Image (cartoon, rainbow, N blue to C red):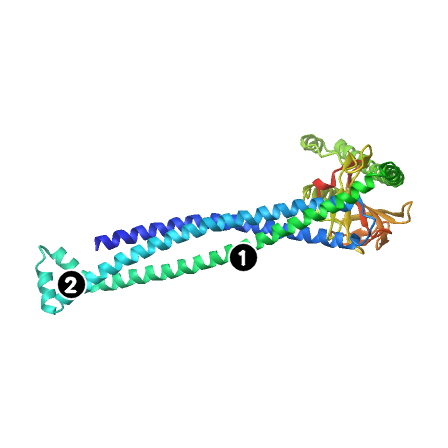
Amino acid sequence: MTIGNKHIITFVLLCLFALHLTPSSAQNRQSLEKEKAKLEKEISSMNAILKETRQNKKMSTSELQIIRKKVEQRQQLVKNISSQIGILDSQIKNTQQSITNSYRDLQVMKQNYAQMLRYAQKNKSGMDKLLFIFAAKDYKEAYQRYIFFRKSAQIQRQQMALIQNKTIELSSMTEDLLSQKQSQSVLLRQEQVNTDNLNKERKQQEKVVNDIKKQENKIAKQIKEKEAKKKKLQNQINAAIAEEVKKQAKIAETKRKNAATSNTAKANTDKKTTTNNAKEPEKKNYVMSATPKEEALSNSFANNKGKLPWPVAKGVIVSGFGRHPHPDIAGVEIENLGVDIRTTKGSSVKAVFEGEVCKVWAGPNGNKIVIIRHGEYMTVYTNLASVSVSDGTKVSTGQSIGTIATNENGQSEMNFQVRQGVKCQNPVLWLAR
């Protein structure tokens, strides 16, 4: 019995050790699976966007930007899958070791059980059992021998059944892991093939860009003309925002003056109130917010930094925030007070947060621009073919405000901006990743 118990303890400890390791590995794989799903969704969006302009012989540098990002995402996806395979390899090795230990314990238990059967065969008569019990040196030992006869066979069978069940469970687990590993290996090979194909596609696209660069002076001139048009539109946006800030700041100042006058009058009749007001903590000086409700809206918007939904369901940023050199045309700089987001034709443009539409108008090219105020913050949506809101419309988060416009080259692109008062914010830092 001592040997059997020793092996049972060893077996239990091994099982506990394996259970201790499993949650961590499972958690890592779960995290990788979430990342993998996110990457696949982003790649799917890029494929949909590229599909619309791929047939256009006049390929643009913005398509190249999308392809480059797609390659990066593919590479991350391959790395992700490889990491999952590594985790599976480790789990399989641990499971196989556990199975080996279980079978070893099972063999020992079988030997012990066989010895008990042989002993029981030799002492099968009731008289032999009684003699064995009464031969004990004291009552305690006699009672233990009695219990031994009653429970030993049952305990042995239970222990053997436990190990056999555990062995079957571990064998099934190994089969599952091997199957998962095989599936992941197949997926890895597919992703590697996709990455190779994508690299070829990128080289083809770069070849087109190189051909374009042969006419660099002409293209640089076209880009400058386009930037001039964008500058004209941006001036309109800046003027509209400045006007709204001035308007709301005036309202806020009037509210503050009225509140101060009211407090002063009240303080003249109640010194205790004046004392209490002196102890009140200083409130944040909101540039535009004129009511407690709008202050709460400002705070809520600020607290959602990095969590705001994208203004389109499928989108890729093709031009980032700030002043930066053109990625493919030397000597040309681009200034962007927001981010340019490429999406699919006819996409719905949605408000990224609740608020109130403060201005809707048609830009220089005839497409619509919408500005939504969220307390002291504002968001800007450009290049809309149609709009479903007007000045003063209250909107909720995710509400459609219009549809994207598509140019003659099949490109559907919008400029999205975030402002705090007149101060430009980098939208990438506000949108959910």
Find the residue positioned furthest to the bottom: 125
Mark 2: amino acid: Tyr
Mark 1: amino acid: Ser
Closer to viewer: mark 2 or mark 1 = 1
388 in relation to 124, above or below = above
Give the numbered dot on residue 156: none
Label 2, residues with CA under 10 Å away: few <14, some 14-19, many ≥20: few
Task: Say whether marks 2 and 1 touch (CB < 8 Å).
Answer: no
Give the numbered dot on residue 119: 2
Q: Nearer the viewer, residue 173 or 218?
A: 218
Q: Quadrant of the C terminus?
A: top right
Q: Quadrant of the N terminus?
A: bottom left
Q: Secondary structure at mark 1?
A: helix
On the question of residue 31 being in view, the answer is no
* Residue 395 x %, y %: 78, 52
Label 1, residues with CA under 10 Å away: few <14, some 14-19, many ≥20: few
Q: Nearer the viewer, residue 314 or 193?
A: 193
> Marks 2 and 1, how far apart in space?
52 Å
Q: Nearer the viewer, residue 137 or 129?
A: 129
* Residue 151 x %, y %: 22, 62
11 in relation to 291, above or below = below
What's the residue at 72%, 53% (across, down)? 47
343 in relation to 150, above or below = above
Q: Secondary structure at mark 2?
A: helix
Res 281 → quadrant: top right
User: What residue does disc 1 label?
Assistant: 183
* Residue 4 x %, y %: 25, 55
On the question of residue 253 being in view, the answer is yes
